[in-house]
Structures are given as C-alpha cells and as structure tokens.
Amino acid sequence: MRREALARRRAAFAAHGAEAAEAAARRFMEAAPAGEGRVLAGYWPIRSEIDPLPLLRLAHGAGWRIALPAILGEGLPLAFRLWTPDSPLTEGPFGARVPPPGSPEVAPDLLAAPLVAFDRSGGRLGYGGGFYDRTLEALRALKPIRACGFAFSAQESAHLPQEPTDARLDAVVTERETILLTREGETGA
C-alpha cells in the first residue's frame, strides 16, 4: 500500500509540484483561523512531498509564528522549533532541514502534516516511524490542536487500515479542496 501511494505521490509531484503547492497553500490559508501570535507547525519537504514552504511563508506574513519539527530520537514525539523564512537551518534526519538545537521550542496550535496517503475518515499513512502519531497524542493531551494533512489530491486512498495508536487528522488540504474530517466519536469538524 505504501509503495503504491508513494508512486502516486511521485507522479503528482512530477506533474504538478510547484503549482499544486501554491494552490494548496492559498486554500489552506483561506480555511485557517486568524493567526496573530498562534503557532503553525509545518515541515521541511523531502522526497516528493508537497512543498509546504509557500504555505509557511504566507502564514508567516499573516502573523502566524512558524515551527518546524525536529526528531529527538526513536520512539519519541517530535519537538517543534520556531522558524522564520530567514532563520538558519541545519541538516536533520532523512534529509530534512531543521532549526538548530537551542532554537525555542513551542507547542503548535495548528499542524500541517506531511503524509504518504490519506482517506476521508481522517486516516493518515506516513513513513511507518510513528513520529506524528506519538506527537499528536502528546500535543492533544496538552491543549486543543488541529492536525491537517497537506497533500496532493492524488494521495487520497479509499480506505486506510488504522491501528489504535494511529492519530487521525482533522482536515486535509490539497491543491483541489479542503476536506474537513471528524475523528471517531466526534460529531463535527
């Protein structure tokens, strides 16, 4: 399933990469609440992920404080460190760029998550390390946070198998649409 989803994502990236990223960024910002002083966590793009940098720049210009994830170790939740478009970055695991150690850490209010595939029940397929599942569980225990997949529309799957430890998404934004989701047991998005 992951191999097939990655092939769809690579094809979408090759065919529509930059244009899709710009369209998804505009769509995300149209749906996002006012950001003044709030924290939006994004990610540094690797491989064929949809590029969130247009989104992060727009959000920064709209008053959001921006954070990027840092892997602290296997089996641990991600840490989110503040970032601005002119901040220095260092090389992190898997080829991602990250704010250096010592950068201020924050708990995001809104999370734009990378993914391999998603479904309309809030399921998210990642790379298999469980980092975002652990992270969302920890963040949701601290405060209300909305997790939004940021993806190409081609990454949609009809149904993704879910385990009890999988953290569901609240929404997914693609270049074509904003999909509001409900997690099991909730009645609204």
Image (spheres, rainbow, N blue to C red):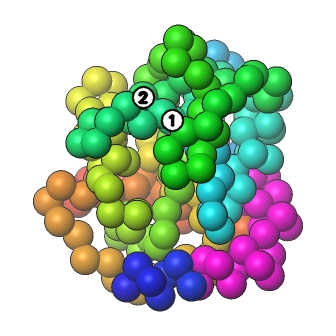
The percent coordinates of residue 76 (x first, y second) are 27, 36
In the picture of the structure, the residue carrying the numbered disc 2 is 79
Within 10 Å of the Cα at label 2, are there few (<14), some (14-19), or many (20+) other Cα atoms?
Answer: some
Q: Residue 46: name its quadrant.
A: bottom right
Residue 96: horizontal and vertical position, in percent? 60, 46
Instruction: From the viewer's perspective, tell me whether residue 48 is left or right of residue 70.
Output: right
- Along the viewing direction, whichever of 61 and 35 lies nearer the viewer: 61
Numbered disc 2: secondary structure: strand
Q: CA distance from mark 1 to mark 2?
A: 6 Å
The answer, for residue 22, to whether it is visible in the render is yes
In percent of the image, x 67 and y 24: which residue is there? 83
Amino acid type of disc 1? Pro
Numbered label tally:
2
Question: How would you classify the magenta stretch by its main secondary structure?
Answer: helix
Q: Which residues are magenta?
A: 8-27
Instruction: Between residue 43 and residue 172, name the one nearer to us.
Output: 43
Q: Amino acid at mark 2?
A: Ala
Q: Residue 100, position in %: x, y?
A: 59, 22
Q: Nearer the viewer, residue 147 or 179?
A: 147
Above or below, comparing residue 126 to residue 165 in the picture: below
Residue 43, compared with residue 169, is above or below; it is above
179 is within the stretch colored magenta: no
Seen at 44% across and 83% down, the residue is 3
Instruction: Point out which mark residue 69 bears.
Output: 1
